[in-house]
Image (tube, rainbow, N blue to C red):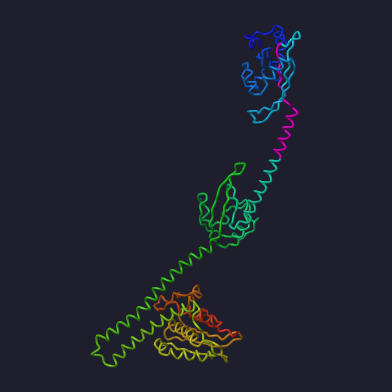
């Protein structure tokens, strides 16, 4: 104590007072300060030094006034008026960034009825502090409640987005075990939402995909097998994260692109078919063109030497080539017209069996050239039916042409016409090599031919497509089967209703 105030001259009685109670003030938890009659701060205990952060040095009145504004005037007034003063102050704690309410009592020190200084006590206003804490607790509670509501709403929103996402989603742990999967993801993998929980993700990915790893937010196609064993192509993306316990997890999104993949394959196949068609049509056009050009050129060069018989032979060859070209062009025009709906059909009652027999007579020479016999069997009485004669003739002619083209030499083509309860039917059996099972349907597509054409039989791949389109306009259909005795059979149905 003496060290702190040795440079200040004090009233002897005040000094005696200070020394008498110094040990009590120094160890007291309440901040205490002493001022002489000139309002000079002559002593501050450790508790006040802690508040003012003076590190065992005697603080100044300015430092005290900086913390408690207006206290200097209150001290001067207390000493001058010889009256106690009481101040309420709120101080913001630097450590906790919190407001602390204080009650400051300033009392005069009186000896011989004379004011010789003042003593200051700084006490925490417990009541106000409690009220402050209550208010803070209430505000904090309201804030927590508000945050809880927001968190709950956010959680519900995330769950709603997860459950109703148009893409498949699943949450995986660090070992890629499924923690959660949404409904769309379960539908894609053909399982239930609860079934795959706890199972490894690779349960659904084929073995060659199991060891893959991709960068975050990068799309990758993977092969997948659903719970029912169906193979699919998935476009997936994975994002890694950590929860509040710093445990890693990942969110994986995926969509089924199997149909897109099929469409891509179909587009490639379509391009291949078109390329084959262009090759075939070029070949088909080139052959009659060579014939026409060659025989006409020969006729020009030998015009003076040609006799009638030789000229007739040349003209027949030219005519035959022209007919082939016309047929090819007509096929192309027919497909375009049928697709656009520009062909007008002229329906009238026709006896179908008579139409078939008339067309067969056209093929006598072609059949004889291969040693092929054509047999016709009309099973029962056939009623007349409204149809476009020209276009139905085109259908029958095309089927018989194919049968002769693809049947073996010196074989038999059997044509059966009959009427059932539902339709008038035409069956055309050949004794060729048949049709590959996977081509029985595709041969009716435009520009598509059976691989049998690799033998050199030719064709553009339009004839059967035209037949199907014509029959669709007659409430009919056409399909092909392989005959158990060898060869193929083409069936036409013209439905009665």
Whole-percent x, y for residue 98 in the image: 66, 31
Instruction: Residue 486: tell me if it is visible.
Output: no
**The furthest residue to the left:** 304
Q: Would you say 38 lies left or right of 167 here?
A: right
Identify the magenta region. Answer: 116-141
Q: Residue at x 35, y 87 (%)?
A: 319
Return the residue nearer the eye: 475 or 99: 99
Q: What is the total number of numbered labels drawn onto the structure image?
A: 0
Q: Quadrant of residue 5?
A: top right
Whole-percent x, y for residue 356 in the image: 50, 89
Whole-percent x, y for residue 232 in the image: 55, 61
In the picture, the quarter occupied by the N terminus is: top right
Whole-percent x, y for residue 199 in the image: 61, 53
Name the magenta segment's main secondary structure.
helix
The answer to if 268 sits in the magenta stretch is no
**On screen, residue 311 above or below 174:** below
Q: Would you say 363 lies left or right of 211 here?
A: left
Q: Would you say 412 lies left or right of 30 here?
A: left
**On screen, residue 63 above or below 401:** above
In the picture, the quarter occupied by the C terminus is: bottom right
Return the residue nearer the eye: 258 or 297: 297
Q: Would you say 209 lies left or right of 296 here?
A: right
Q: Residue at x 31, y 89 (%)?
A: 313
Q: Quadrant of residue 47?
A: top right
**On screen, residue 152 above or below 96:** below
Return the residue nearer the eye: 118 or 228: 118
Return the residue nearer the eye: 357 or 340: 340
Instruction: Residue 271: tell me if it is visible.
Output: yes
**The furthest residue to the top:** 12
**On screen, residue 484 above or below 160:** below
**The furthest residue to the bottom:** 308
């Amino acid at each position: 104590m003496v060290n702190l105030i040795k440079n200040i001259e004090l009233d002897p009685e005040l000094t005696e007072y200070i020394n008498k109670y110094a040990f009590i003030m120094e160890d007291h938890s309440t901040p205490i300060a002493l001022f002489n009659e000139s309002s000079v701060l002559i002593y501050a205990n450790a508790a006040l030094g802690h508040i003012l952060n003076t590190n065992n040095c005697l603080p100044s009145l300015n430092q005290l006034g900086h913390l408690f504004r207006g206290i200097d005037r209150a001290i001067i007034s207390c000493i001058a008026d010889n009256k106690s003063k009481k101040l309420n102050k709120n101080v913001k704690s630097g450590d906790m960034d919190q407001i602390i309410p204080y009650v400051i009592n300033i009392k005069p020190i009186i000896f011989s009825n004379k004011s010789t200084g003042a003593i200051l006590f700084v006490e925490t206003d417990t009541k106000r502090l409690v009220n402050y804490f209550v208010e803070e607790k209430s505000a904090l509670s309201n804030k927590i409640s508000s945050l809880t509501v927001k968190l709950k709403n956010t959680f519900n929103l995330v769950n709603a987005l997860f459950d109703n996402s148009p893409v498949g989603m699943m949450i995986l742990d660090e070992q890629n075990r499924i923690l959660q999967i949404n409904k769309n993801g379960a539908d894609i993998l053909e399982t239930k939402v609860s079934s795959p929980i706890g199972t490894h993700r690779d349960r659904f990915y084929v073995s060659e995909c199991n060891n893959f790893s991709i960068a975050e937010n990068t799309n990758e196609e993977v092969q997948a097998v659903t719970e029912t064993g169906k193979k699919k192509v998935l476009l997936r993306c994975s994002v890694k994260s950590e929860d509040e316990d710093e445990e890693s997890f990942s969110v994986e999104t995926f969509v089924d692109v199997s149909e897109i993949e099929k469409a891509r394959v179909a587009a490639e196949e379509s391009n291949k078919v078109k390329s084959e068609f262009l090759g075939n049509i070029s070949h088909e056009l080139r052959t009659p063109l060579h014939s026409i050009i060659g025989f006409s050129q020969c006729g020009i060069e030998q015009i003076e030497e040609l006799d009638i018989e030789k000229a007739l032979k040349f003209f027949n060859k030219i005519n035959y080539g022209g007919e082939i070209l016309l047929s090819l062009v007509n096929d192309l025009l027919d497909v375009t017209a049928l697709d656009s709906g520009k062909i007008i059909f002229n329906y009238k009652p026709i006896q179908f069996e008579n139409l078939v027999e008339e067309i067969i007579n056209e093929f006598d020479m072609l059949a004889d050239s291969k040693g092929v016999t054509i047999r016709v069997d009309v099973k029962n009485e056939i009623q007349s039916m409204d149809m476009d004669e020209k276009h139905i003739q085109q259908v029958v002619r095309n089927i018989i042409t194919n049968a002769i083209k693809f049947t073996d030499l010196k074989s038999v083509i059997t044509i059966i016409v009959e009427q059932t309860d539902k339709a008038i039917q035409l069956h055309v059996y050949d004794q060729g090599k048949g049709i590959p099972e996977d081509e029985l349907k595709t041969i009716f597509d435009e520009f598509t031919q059976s691989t049998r054409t690799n033998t050199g039989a030719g064709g553009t791949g339009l004839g059967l497509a035209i037949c199907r389109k014509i029959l669709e306009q007659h409430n009919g259909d056409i399909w092909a089967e392989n005959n158990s005795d060898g060869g193929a059979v083409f069936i036409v149905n013209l439905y009665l209703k």
